[in-house]
């Protein structure tokens, strides 16, 4: 069932991309955009500092992460194993380049954008590449959790 949900979400993302190119649908309201960008900043502040407990709290237990380089991760537990390894090897830093946010009625929001990654070497940031991403945020009451991430179009 989880795979069918994932396929449906991927189709939704693809349809949304196509529809947004063909329609005049506007991006999310300023308040939703501000909320998602603030959450994005919080997630990646924790990522940049290797604050794994805080980082983990932003992800749904059943999060699925698709990466065109590293493959498929099917749970928060597996995502955190990967993050622990990244942090044990010096960590990474992420910089948001651009983002758009779209409301997903009765669910939450979709954030789409570009980001860059760096590694700290001898006190200097060394570029590690860039990628495009789609993040699906689920809102339940006042809580927001990341349920799906697609990271693609990686460039060195």
Image (cartoon, rainbow, N blue to C red):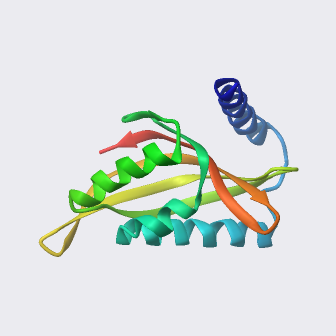
Image point (78%, 71%), residue name: 30
Q: Residue at x 53, y 42 (%)?
A: 75
Q: Residue at x 35, y 58 (%)?
A: 117
Along the line of sight, which residue is nearer the eye, 152 or 22?
A: 152
Say which residue appears at 29% left-offset and 60% top-offset. Answer: 87
Q: Position of residue 124 (x, y in %)?
A: 19, 72
Q: Quadrant of the C terminus?
A: top left
How far across and how far down the image is residue 125, in percent?
24, 68
Give the quarter of the image for residue 26.
Answer: bottom right
Placement of 14 over or under 24, stated as above or below: above
Q: Is residue 96 left or right of residue 138?
A: left
Query: For this rendering, which residue is in front, 3 or 22?
Result: 3
Asked if residue 66 lies left or right of residue 1, the reply is left
* Position in image of residue 152 (x %, y %): 47, 39
Side (left or right) of 10 relative to 133: right
Q: Position of residue 144 (x, y in %)?
A: 70, 62
């Amino acid at each position: 069932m989880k795979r069918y949900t994932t396929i449906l979400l991927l189709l939704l993302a693809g349809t949304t991309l196509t529809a947004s190119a063909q329609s005049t649908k506007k991006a999310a309201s300023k308040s939703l955009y501000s909320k998602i960008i603030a959450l994005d900043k919080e997630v990646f502040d924790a990522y940049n500092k290797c604050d794994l407990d805080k980082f983990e709290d932003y992800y749904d237990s059943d999060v699925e992460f698709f990466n065109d380089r590293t493959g498929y991760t099917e749970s928060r537990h597996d995502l955190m194993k990967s993050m622990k390894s990244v942090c044990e090897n010096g960590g990474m830093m992420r910089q948001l380049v651009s983002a758009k946010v779209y409301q997903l009625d009765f669910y939450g929001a979709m954030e789409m954008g570009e980001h860059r990654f760096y590694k700290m070497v001898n006190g200097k940031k060394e570029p590690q590449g860039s990628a495009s991403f789609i993040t699906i945020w689920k809102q339940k009451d006042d809580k927001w959790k990341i349920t799906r991430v697609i990271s693609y179009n990686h460039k060195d």
